[in-house]
Amino acid sequence: MLSLFKNNRCHVCRNNREQRYCLRIGKTICWNCCVAQKMDGHCPDECEYNFKRESGFMQFSKNKVDSITEQEAFLRKQMDRWINMEVNELGGRIPVEVAKTDDGKKEIERLFPVNKVPVYLPIKHLFKKLDIITDKSYPEREDYEVIAKEYLNTFISEEWEELYKLTSLSIENDFIAEFEEHITTDKTMLKFKTFSLVASALSETHNEALVQFDVNNKIDFTLYLVLNRGKWYVKARIMGDMKLVYAESDTIRIVAQHMNPEQLGNAYEYMKKYEKTYPDSPDVAYYWGLYYTLSGMNDKAKHFFVKAIKLDRTFVNARYNYGFILQAENKLDDAKDVYLEILKFNPKEIKTLNNLAIIALARNDYDEAEKYLRRCLKHQPDFEYAKKNLELIESLRKGEK
């Protein structure tokens, strides 16, 4: 696991996290210093972040940036420059001079009709600079970065119920009772006091996003968000930078390779390490369940299988293993309920169908058992367990005659 604590400060301000190599000074800098520096137009043309004065809404350019927050900061700098420039739309006059009269303020305001101002444009900043008071309702940002910042502010203020509403768990799960305990398990997060946004990324399908922060000026922290019915929700925390999101599948693969009776010690060490990096991972919770199953500690195993299900209600393997333990404990009604839930997500899950048949057999309900077994063999004709159980039913029926 990569270290959370790093000495990676910007070579200009010495405060913010370094983010990109600056061709102009030959050192790594933060995006804040990049934005401040490039406004003079002296950065090399080879730099992809260079201020390119392209045409945009009211001459405001959207150049290469690594986040919406950086874009907004860049536009603020352009606005500060714009108010002191001769503007064609004002007949070559300078906005700061025009705004000295009430009529001039109204003239500038008319340049920015509500239905044409892009949501990314910080219009309130411009109007404040020119002392323009408006009663118009301009669009407000409600993107993934806004929700991510709100999440961290709410966490720092320890408003757990409000925090829960910002997570995807609130959409489809009943996790509120366990949420506070789950969210406060990580002692590092409880020390979060300040944060600044480093970068963000939006998926090609525009329904997933990552937002990376620099917390307490020393900790890399990332939030993974999903879009649901037009609203962004936090789905997972990653204690590290954005690259660790893409490493999670490799991490789980390493754990899976050691999840056997001979290597449980190694599995435990990997699990302890990775659960800190991926505290909201249903896969990590699932493998803890497997670990305790192999260790013969069924109560702990059930706890983690239930946690995995809470974190991902569609997690069929977690439901199956939970149901299997309940069945082994002869809690047949509870096991049956779990298995029936699985079929809602995967009606063709043959192991589940077979186990439902076994429960029916234990109750001498041969017709129901046969129904589940026939469904099993319809989906997988060579499934031996189902074949043998069907033969058993036929034998039991003959024995009753």
Image: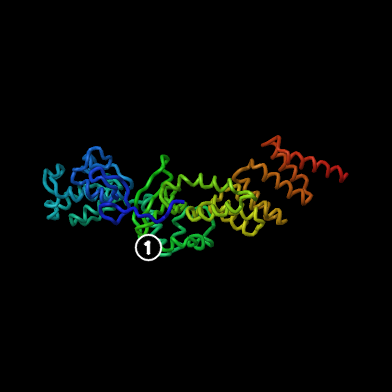
| Placement of the C terminus among the 4 image quadrants | top right
290 vs 25, nearest the viewer: 25
| Rendering quarter of residue 239 | bottom left
Q: Residue 271: image x %, image y %?
A: 54, 53
Classify 10 Å Cα crowding around label 1: few (below 14), some (14-19), many (20 and above). some
* Residue furthest to the right: 401
150 vs 123, nearest the viewer: 150
| Rendering quarter of residue 188 | bottom left
Residue 316 in view of the camera: yes
Snapshot colouring: rainbow
- Name the residue at 12% across, 45% down: 86
Q: Residue 175: image x %, image y %?
A: 53, 58
Disc 1 target residue:
193
382 vs 43, nearest the viewer: 43
Q: Residue 227: image x %, image y %?
A: 44, 47
88 vs 76, nearest the viewer: 76
Q: Residue 38: image x %, image y %?
A: 22, 46
**Which residue type carries mark 1?**
Lys
Determine whether the residue tagged by mark 1 lies in a helix, strand or loop. loop
User: In this rendering, would 132 be left or right of 393?
Assistant: left
| Rendering quarter of residue 253 | top right
Number of numbered labels in the structure image: 1
* Residue furthest to the bottom: 158
User: In this rendering, would 105 be left or right of 375?
Assistant: left
Residue 61 in view of the camera: no
- Name the residue at 26% across, 48% down: 34
